[in-house]
Structure formats: structure tokens, C-alpha cells
Image (cartoon, helix red, strand yellow):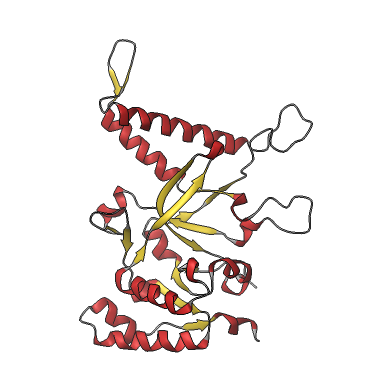
Amino acid sequence: MSAISDNLIHFLSRSNKESPGKQLDVFKQIVENGLRTGRVQIKFDSGTSIINQIICFTDIPLRECNEHTSIYGKFGIGFKKSFVKNAGGNPARYFLDYLPGQTLTEASVESRGGLYSVLCNQHKLVMKINDLLISNPDFGLFDAEGTSIFTAAALKEQIAAMIFILSFEKEMGDLGPARDETKEIDLYYKEREWRLVPSTLTVVSGAAKLKAGTETYFYLFDRNDVNMIVVPNDEVRTVVLKYFLSLGNSADERLKSFAENPLPVINYDDLHRW
């Protein structure tokens, strides 16, 4: 069994994983309006965090998704990796969320957690400068002679860039603690997350649109951007296939293409019956 898949699966509506009917409504909204960003929290030390608009995917091969689907449900859309890459997606960057000194060893100096420590310091610097800009819109950086090095506008651009970068970070302990010295593997191997994080470039390139008056972005996709649909049972599979056929009556050529060449719709549980 290959450990590599061309699918990046977006398992949708985690909060409704026990309610396929509600998931179906969300699925139709995604097909018609595009993938929708949601608020995701990236945690740092001392209870601080970044919250940004993000869309998440997994690149775990579908047959190996049992533990993943136990958390996120069995209703998903399998996008081509090329679509997510072209839209600006990247793999999440995992870090060990231990600060030096938290592992309770007797060593006077610890290496474990060094990356997390640096990330936390970067986050503190970003938030400190951001707070200064909020309290003083004309805040800038100057050299000893008073020459401007970074204007407020330039600093704001750098802050936005750093928040964008930090939004790809993910703590390995998000799904549970490290399983060192046990027969179990760390749970992050059962996520293998990719992310779409909107930026100014996202909008300028046309990859996504910002909904007016909100922080929510929508990424439209075509029939050819998707490999397959995975559903929790045969009843939902039938409804999804009928829905695709109904799009043949749409005046929107993008939607009509889903009827002209219906996607494979797979009952997740069928994968494990043979």
C-alpha cells in the first residue's frame, strides 16, 4: 500500500460528523460557492495564540484514514494536490510543543523544544510590534540619526507576512501527547495536514475571494480540480449522485460540468469490506 496519495481530502463539517444530512447541506454549499475558510487557532506558550482564516486537508491515503475519520467524520472531497498547490496551499509545519525545561529531565540544558522556543519568541515579537502599531499608528523604526528604517506601513506588511507564515505552524500535541518509548506512533502522523491560508496574493491572483464585510474567503474549484467524493453511507452516496445530475440544469457552466462528468462517489466503509 503506497504511503503517498494524489488526493488532498477536505473532510467537511466536523461538528456535524454524526449528522450526514447537515454535512450534505455543507457539501452542496461548497460545490456551489467554493471552499470556505474557517477560524483556526495556532497555540503558543503562556496561553497566547494566532487565530486565522484557514482551510485544512489531509494527504493520508484514503484506506488509512480510520483514525482521522473517527475525529473528522467520513464526508469529504478529494482534491488534486495540484489544485491546492496552485491556490497557495502548503503542508502544515509541525513542531514539538515542549519548551526547554518542560520534559522534567535532570539535564541543566535541554535541546528538545528549541524550535518551539524560537517560534514563541517570534510570535511575541510580532504581537508586540502589532500592539505598538495599534496604540500609535505612526510608530516606526529609526536609526541613531533618526532616519526611517521601517515606516508604519512597512511594519504592517511585515506583521501580516509573519502571521501568514505562523499560520502554517501546528503543534504536534494537537491530537494528544508524544508517545515516546511506546509502541504507538505520534498522532500527528495520522493527520498529515495541508493548509490554505489566504493572503493579499490570494485575492490578487484570483485564487479566492473575500466575502464583503467578513473575514471569510471562498475558493472556487472546477470539476477537473477534484478526484473523488467520499461519503459515510450508501444513502448519502445516492443523494450526492442525484445532486450532481441535477446540476445539468444550472445556467452556470462550472456547475453544469459536474453533471456532464460526475465524480466517483465512494462509500468510505466499502473500502474496508474487501
Disc tally is 0
Split into 4 quadrants, where in the image is the N terminus?
bottom right
Compared across the picture, whether 150 is left or right of 39 comes to: left
Name the side, left or right, on which 4 lies relative to 152: right
Q: Position of residue 67 (x, y in %)?
A: 63, 67
Taking the image as shown, residue 232 lies to the left or right of residue 100, namely: left
Q: Quadrant of residue 111?
A: top right
Q: What residue lies at 36% left-to-right and 59% top-to-bottom?
A: 87
Query: At 41% across and 42% down in the image, what residue appears?
Result: 163
Locate residue 149: give its quadrant: top left
- Where is residue 273, by image quadrant? bottom right
**Which residue ends up furthest to the top in the rendered image?**
145
How far from the left and from the top, in percent, is residue 4?
58, 66
Q: Is residue 9 visible?
A: no
Vertical relation: 56 (above or below) 99: below
> Does residue 99 appear in the picture of this structure?
yes
Placement of 181 over or under 155, stated as above or below: below
**Which quarter of the figure is the C terminus placed in?**
bottom right
Q: Position of residue 96 (x, y in %)?
A: 62, 44
The residue positioned 53% from the left and 80% from the top of the image is: 232
